Amino acid sequence: MLSILRAVWTVFLHLFKRKVTVLYPEERPRIPPRWRGRIILSRDPDGQERCVACHLCAVACPVGCIALQAAEDEYGRRYPEFFRINFSRCIFCGFCEEACPTYAIQLTNDFEMSEYHRHNLVYEKQDLLISGTGKYPGYNFYKVAGLSIKGKDKGENENELPPVDVKGLMP
Amino acid sequence: MEDKKLVTVYIEDKPYRVRPDQSMLDACLSLGFDLPYFCWHPAMHSVGACRQCAVKQFKDENDRKGMIVMACMTPAGEGTRISIKDPEAVEFRAKVIEWLMLNHPHDCPVCDEGGECHLQDMTVMTGHAYRRTRFRKRTHRNQYLGPFVNHEMNRCIQCYRCVRFYNDYAGGRDFGVFAAHDNVYFGRQEDGVLESEFSGNLVEVCPTGVFTDRTLKMHYTRKWDLQTAPSVCVHCGLGCNTIPGERYGTLRRIRNRYNGQVNGYFICDRGRYGYEFANSATRIRRPYRITYGKAGEKIENALEEGKVLPHVKSLLQGAKGIIGIGSPRASLEANYLLKKFCGPGNFYAGFSDAEFNLVGRIISVLTGGPVKAPALREVAEADAVFVLGEDVSGTAPMLGLAIRQAVRQKPVEAVIKSGIPAWNDYAVRQAVQNDKGPFFIATSAATRIDSLAEGTFHGAPDDIARLGFAVAAAISPEAPAPDGSLPEAAAGLVPRIAARLREAKRPVIISGTGAGSRAVIEAAFNVAKSLFDSGKDAGLCYVAAECNSIGLGLMGGKSLREAVGAVRENRADTVIVLENDIFDRLSAPEAEALLSARQVISIDHLPNHTVSMAHTVLPAAVFAEGTGTFVSNEGRAQRFYRVYVPAGQVEESWRWLSEFLAASAGAKFFTVDDVQRAMAGELPAFGGVPAAAPPADFRISGLKIPRQPHRYSGRTSIHADVDVNEPKPPADPDSPLSFSMEGFDGRPPSALISRFWAPGWNSVQAVNKFQSEVGGRLRGGDPGQRLIGPAGKEKSLPYFTGIPAPFTRLEGKFLVVPLYHVFGSEKLSALSPPVSELVPSPYLALNPEDAGELGCTEGMEIRLIVEDVFFRLAARLDASIARGVAGFPLGLPGLHGITLPSWGRIGIPPGVREAAEESGEDRA
Amino acid sequence: MGKTVPETIRHLIIVFGVLAVMMSIAAGLIWVERRLLGFWQDRYGPNRVGPFGILQPLADMIKVFAKEDWVPPFADRPVFILAPAIIVVTVLLAFAVVPFAPSISVADLNVGLLYFLALSSLGVYSVALGGWASDNKYALIGALRASAQMISYEVFMGLSLMGVVMLAGSFNLRAIVEAQRRLWFVVPQFFGFVIFLIAGVAETHRLPFDLPEAESELVAGFHSEYSGMKFGLFFVGEYLGITLISALIATFFFGGWLGPLLPPAVWFFIKTFFFIGVFILLRATLPRPRYDQLIRLGWKVMLPLALANLVVTGGIILAAG
């Protein structure tokens, strides 16, 4: 009984405590760098699209809000023909970023994306693609992948030997 | 009751009863154990190359030490005792995969195999997760291998499966392994199109991404994103089972669907790559009617939804007689409803007259004769094969592959007797060397499987038939013998063929409609019956040209020429053409006469000559967009299912016809099951059709079977560009399959398998989990229901006696016979861009001596006149063609509208010879 | 009854005034409660709509009026619609006997206290019918709990007030207030006050006694199926109930309008709002007991306590002569 009264008194005293509420938007919150906000597609250091349309983000997405179609340029470099994220369904879980093998898809610390119409939350590739490398400045997937693309022939990666001469006779 | 032939093996100290004629890897996989492997393939057995299936074998229950052995090279003997989980074996397997991954590139995100990669699965299964090696990876240059297969050699793990399939199993000669040690290279001697018509199977055989589907690459989709449903190939009459995959409303690829009785693990490239006609930009997507403008020009008036039926109804009410033209490429259901709608007297089978008679004869022989029609697997297990008149490698390629296996049966049996188990592939092949079992082939011209044959004969169809009759007479004295002499080459063959067939236990005789000759079909029957009468377990396999030829033949109806008569005599003024181009079946004047009826309604999916002449055109669904039944050449009714709902106002043909029926008679069929029930009740021949697959109300634990894999992605974004509210998935009243990822996620009945997947087995190798034993039947039996079977011995048809006279050359004329090509002779597949790349340009094959007499050389332009139809063709000299015979590649673009074989005249256009001589002089 | 015209007008003014004031207090409480809860939880609470968020009730009202007036197809339609009205009507009727000031009360009943008890028992019909008409298992369980709870707590609610009646010698609320001129009854009737407070919380099924709603187990209890304005009525009914109980605590135990300097009505409202604050503070502090604990507390602790209080009070009055 006394404990109840003490509890009531303790709670009552909170009337005079400092409030923890951050009064957004007058007061801006501090967003940590690994915040999971608006999703972007980054480019590799050469300025090419990093996304190779591997579909892993789409399959990792628990709400199925990512759809894309792969296409290839004339040299065999893969890129998404279209890439769509329906942010009205996105739960910002970050699984897509975790799944991405090329650091292409990244979550940023922008969370201010309210819209009056849901269809304005459907972002296509041109809305997602940024001009920089995002959080991972150095990485270039095609520098480590075995596939040849424009400007990089077979065996030109750092971790590769030159192509085998199939008709050679050396043991 | 237990089979006495079984032996007891111990896996993890638990006893299991297994067949002794298999390896321990077979046994483990059949029992459901997860044991990694690479080089072993259920159709090609063990070579023990990859060392991945290592297990520990123990001498007896007291042996605790054991030794590491390869499961695929260990026979399942009585008391064999192994452990898969033994820590040493587990570590060994992990090491092996680490070695295999040494040079494997960092490619998975851009690799088409990713997500259905056996190497990925096995790497996960063995637990190799981190790369430890610090050395650099070896690389290879790729080759261009044609429009079907993409080559990415860096990914190779040297399992040798590709060469073992391509060369050893499918008999390819332009593919091999080059270089040595860790440099080995699998490819062609130089860039170029792979010659084998089974090259597409490399995609499924390769455990990783060295060989991938090049057509899929053009519109790439991962396996988990494909909406799939069981289907049946429409590009020949064999009825191979397939799995088409769809994404974003277009067909993305075809995969083989294992059916132990029919196609097994492989399908031909025509079936695998012929699908893209379904995505054609020229597809008919909305109904329209034709009106004529002031200047007489045609105007297409689109018929909006809801306006089609009133329009059709008004047409039908004004009609003075309605006839329906069926189609051998439309489903049984569509043909049946057309027959029901027009009345049995007004239903005309959509065959050419010649084919109508041939198919009719085949059905009467298969149902009235004593000999069964073998399934493809039974052909592959035959120990003697005699092909009469049919170029199977052109008209039914998978039959060619089956014959290739049949040719090995006898030598392999001998090897097995010497103590080498059948599964020890390398040893068996070393022992067999080039030995071949009895195989004879008699055709108009050389075929791609001639090199397998012990004896070949090339001649006119009548001579081929006479050879058949002579063989029958040599086997059984009761069979009538041809009078007069056979050509020299044939005469020498007769006793050999007869002797070799008599030695066999399970001979198979193959013929078909390809030669266009009734006598050939009858001769094949006589041979088969003679063998049957002498106590053999003989098979008689007829090749039918199209996917539902036999079904349409069973449906009956009248011949197309009678339909022309009906229109000419004004007995009918309205013609409904079902998925058919009349110009392929009739000569142009006859077709035009038929289509000159007051009203022509064409139901089809792609524009063709008939569609262009129709007054009302209704868009039909292609195979992957509809549900129905095809009857294969062995009389097997097989259900195919709607893979996706097509865009536009496209409907299944049978649904259009059921709407017609509702509009006129009031009786409407709502589902495929309704149609089948009515059909089975009305036409006894189709009594087995409903049993070919579970009905639409079939459920497992109350659940439908999903067409989408449980990992299907993009549900809330695919349509988001159109509408952010997700649409309701389409309903499917015709099947127990649903258009969503929800439903029963386990192993469905065999006729409803939409994909092969099992936990941990994302690649096509998951098929092991769906079979009752590895390489055997699917669990619950292979899908399909046989509609026809042989009559009893007593009731059997007698021997045919209509032996044709020997072929004699006519002065100034040539007997034009049809030739077939894998790519080109079948019309729908030839419309697919990758296949059309490989379609040969039109030619006429002539014997060099005949050509010499005509004064024409290879490639020279010549004129051919057959049945008043005129063709300009390039001459091709072919020594295998008999004199007085000309080979005409029927079905190639522009080469149709004539019935073969038929007599024709060949001329050389004025100026051509001179031009050729001049250019020859120039070169000189 | 020879009443003059100005008197009738005065009565009408009082009637509609009480109605208007009570309704606006109930609405205002939406904001007050959320604000206070916020403060007690180190938050601000609604502070965006109007100055200090004071227009929040208006926004809520616009929202609740604009919502679809949805009746589930499986519900018993007439009862379903009637139920929320009952609670508002009964509570509002109970206000008729509350003396806000010496001259401000709607009805000066001699059995005012009994009238209040009777009407507060009627309130249970609203909850019971609403839950039953919803045809939903959670709603029905909530309704059954509400019925059991209210019947149990009503018993000693009445008993706890009998001490007050004995001291005042009247059931008339005005007389009870007048009897406290010397000493507020909270002093002689401290146990009566505590029991009435607890019973009052239970009668209005407020936390910690909100078991009929208990969202963690019953979704939303008896009003699971309610939405829009009908749900709004339940809400208003609850706040009216809080106000009523607070007003009566002030009347019975804290001398009603009595107080120095300020006008009587102001004193009355100060006291009432203090107890409203206590209600909210209880909600901010106490967790919900288990249902069996609630019933056990009612029958095994509160009822004997109320009876004992009655006996002792009676004894003392008797002894004092």
Image: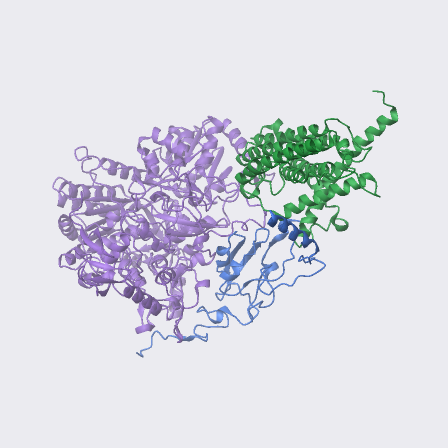
Chain colours: A blue, B purple, C green
Q: Please indicate whether residue B58 sits to the left or right of residue C182 in the image.
A: left
Q: Please indicate whether residue B884 sits to the left or right of residue C313 in the image.
A: left
Q: Residue furthest top?
A: C1
Q: Residue furthest bottom?
A: A170
Q: Is residue B910 visible?
A: yes
Q: Is residue A106 above or below residue C306?
A: below
Residue B363, horizontal then vertical, whole percent: 28, 37
Q: Please indicate whether residue B491 sits to the left or right of residue C90 in the image.
A: left
Residue C210, horizontal then vertical, whole percent: 60, 40
Q: Is residue B781 above or below residue A19?
A: above
Q: Is residue B161 above or below residue B831?
A: below
Which of C196/B107 is in front? C196
Please tell me in which quadrant of the rendered image residue B479 appears. Answer: top left
Which of B306/C253 is in front? C253
Residue B596, horizontal then vertical, whole percent: 47, 35
Residue B536, horizontal then vertical, whole percent: 15, 44
Which of B382/C166 is in front? C166
Please tell me in which quadrant of the rendered image residue B59 appears. Answer: bottom left
On the rendered image, what quadrant is the C terminus of chain B found in? Answer: bottom left
Which of B857/B519 is in front? B519
Q: Is residue C43 visible?
A: no
Tell me the residue at 62%/43% (across/down). C207
Q: Residue furthest left?
A: B477
Q: How many marks?
A: 0
Q: Please indicate whether residue C99 sits to the left or right of residue B505 in the image.
A: right
On the rendered image, what quadrant is the N terminus of chain B found in? Answer: top left
